[in-house]
Amino acid sequence: MLIILLINAPDHLESSHPALQRTEALLRSLTRASACPGIVCYDAQRHLDILIVDLVSAGKRVPHRKGVGVIRKLGADIALSLIHNQHIHKPWIFCTDADVLLPEGYFQVLNMPVQNSGADVAAIVLPYRHFLEKKATQTTELLLQHLRDQETASQLYELHMRYFTNRLGWSGSPYAYSSIGSLLVISANHYAMVRGFPGRPAAEDFYLLNKLAKVGLIACPVSPLVQLQARYSTRVPFGTGPALLKILESGERLTYAPQSFDLLKLFYTELTQMKILPISSQALWTSTLHHDPNATMLLLVLDKIGFEKFIVQQLKQCKTRVRLVRAIHEWFDAFRILKFLHAARDLGNFDIPVLQALSRIYPEARCRSHDYLAFLCNLEQSETQHKGLGRYAGMLPT
């Protein structure tokens, strides 16, 4: 087994910066044990080696405007090359981060039933929970209160993420999975198919999964559980670090209104009712749609994101209902779902606190962060899920 360790730092840090000095010390401690530059034999008995990629020495640091996407891409591309040249025999790329606690049996996920079902799996998204690093020195009442505030912020952020995924699944979206880079196990073949990670400063995991979901299935098993450290950071423009800081400042986490997901569910319900190829964009909708109280809002939101223009073009190109359905799902992907939700917000479905959203859709659960987290986790762990457009492959004409 080979671990590719990318030790990195952004290029705008001063040489005296504590974070840079810690990272440089880590690099020195690892390479000191290396018999061959860049390679460390970590465990000879288990045939476990580490390939060290130096992105922290002067002249090798990552441009701070590019960030984590470039780093993930470099590591995964190296792995893909080694797999392609048969230096590595299992065609899977595991992605994780230094602030993650990996569970026992992490690498055995490839032996689980999800992988032996015959499904065309493009990636696996492992289950997760956030944790806070509690230091022994935090004993004063002021520090303990700060720690409690951090824990609340972490729970609210995780609730927002789980609520979002939960509502996507409830609506019928094929893109209902967690987009977290440190949970990913990626099929090398599918990774190459979509040209790998985009070199973005953030959300590289979101965009990669969005592409992978169109060429295969995204498997979401119930184990093993990965623990993600809830860290406050401004290194990336958005994501966990900045979100936690914002929650800590405001004391709450806003999320999409449940009514917006009602619109999304209505859209997917209409798609499932399509039995023949419609002759016009108006004929796409069933006769019962206009009796639905959400119909007017749905059509306004779809118009705002350009659905009408798209469907008119597709009706000229698609010769079968199956092809049209597939085209709609490919166009209405994870990115456009976000645009849909933002359009619904602009038209009146304003964001609300996540606990308020959850109390509306799950009144049977307790109204505390911890209780809602346990409730949503139990729902997710009921059975392994497969998401993405791969499940539509059998519908396509050969």
Image: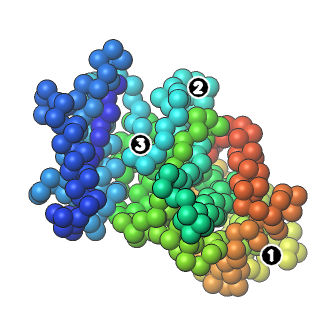
Circle 3 is placed at which residue position? 95
What separation in Å lies between label 2 and label 3 (alpha carbons)? Answer: 18 Å
Quarter of the image for the N terminus: give it. top left
Foreground residue among 108 and 343: 108
Amino acid type, callout 1 = Asn
**Disc 1: which residue:** 294
Q: Is residue 236 visible?
A: yes
Q: Earlier in the sequence, mark 2 or mark 1?
A: 2
Which residue is disc 2 drawn over? 112
Identify which residue is drawn at 58% across, 26% down: 112
Residue drawn 18% across the image and 37% down it: 31
| Amino acid at pointer 3 | Cys
| Label 1 packing within 10 angstroms: few (<14), some (14-19), many (20+) | some
- C-alpha gap between disc 1 and disc 3: 41 Å
Question: Distance from label 2 to label 1 (Cα)?
Answer: 42 Å
Question: Looking at the picture, how far across and down is residue 287, in whole percent?
Answer: 85, 69
Looking at the image, residue 252 sits to the left or right of residue 179; the answer is right
Number of residues whose C-alpha sits closer than 10 Å to that of mark 2, classed few (under 14), some (14–19) or many (20 or more): few
In the drawing, does residue 255 fall left or right of residue 38? right
Where residue 225 appears, x then y in whole percent? 58, 39
